Image (cartoon, rainbow, N blue to C red):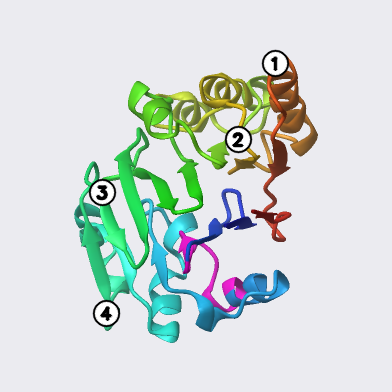
Amino acid sequence: MQVCLLASGSKGNAIFIAAGASKLLVDCGLSATETLNRLAAIGVEGCELDAVLVSHEHTDHVRGAGTLARKLKIPLLVSYPTCREIHTSLRKTEVIEFEAGYQFTFRDILIDPFPITHDACDPVGFLIEAAAGRVGVATDLGIATRLVKDKLQGCRALVVESNHDEEMLLNGPYPWHLKQRIKSRHGHLSNNDSSELLADLLHSRLEAVFLAHLSEVNNDPSVALDVATRLIDSQNLCAPRIVVGEQHRPSDIWAA
């Protein structure tokens, strides 16, 4: 299994996941060309990809999705409502539609798309399971519901949102309406929110935690890392590796 955040932040998001014999992108918010460049930087050829899995329709998650899928002749896996939202960019694209809340099999992996709270038409997180274990992905969510916590139990690797520092957001340059949106139940998790979610998900076999979707304006990687580290250090468990996603280059890779 492998996980790498090719890009993470408000300007574009893409996650590379290898599980079993399958290689996926979760979201493609960069251009197709830049996505291929990021893959090459971690030693992955575009022709190795099997599909692009889409979490929701916001541009920073789907900007290059249709183009990349057509270029590589691979399917786009997307929920019914999200497909309707982005259909104009999917002409001549192979689409496999799924429904949030219902597991489905793709090649040799099980994908469980579960509903999350965000200001999109049908936002989902993902549990991706292969013979070697589970990877959980939950970014772009205003609150970590009980369903989110239940779905992400028992993973070997987690990708969780750590979008903003609450004080930096409050005192930062964003207009008030945008601050309210980010802080709302349909916005984004703060560093502290992310830490509270992790507190429910830590277990002795968790090997890696990726902190994703950090705001370049309202957060700092060292602050996000410190909050997560303090939470993990407070537990009497083997500490997982913590990887902080970046906007302009791929993160370190977790491989098992």
How many neighbours does mark 2 have within 10 angstroms: few (below 14), some (14-19), or many (20 or more)?
many
Measured Cα–Cα span from mark 3 to mark 4: 26 Å
Discs 4/2, front: 2
Q: Is residue 246 above or below residue 179?
A: below
Sequence-wise, the earlier of marks 4 and 1 is 4
How many neighbours does mark 3 have within 10 angstroms: few (below 14), some (14-19), or many (20 or more)?
some
- Residue type, numbered disc 1: Asn
Q: Which residue is mark 3?
A: 103
Sequence-wise, the earlier of marks 2 and 1 is 2
Sequence-wise, the earlier of marks 2 and 3 is 3
Cβ atoms under marks 2 and 3 closer than 8 Å: no
Disc marking residue 206:
2
Residue that lies at the very extreme toward the front in this rendered image:
131
Q: Is residue 89 above or below residue 4?
A: below
Query: Does the magenta-highlighted stretch encompass residue 157?
Result: no
Q: Which residue is mark 4?
A: 91
Q: Nearer the viewer, residue 151 or 35?
A: 151
Q: Is residue 107 above or below residue 189?
A: below
What range of the chain is rendered magenta?
Answer: 21-35
Q: Quadrant of residue 224?
A: top right
At 62% across and 31% down in the image, what residue appears? 164
Residue 8 in the image: state x and y as whole percent: 61, 51
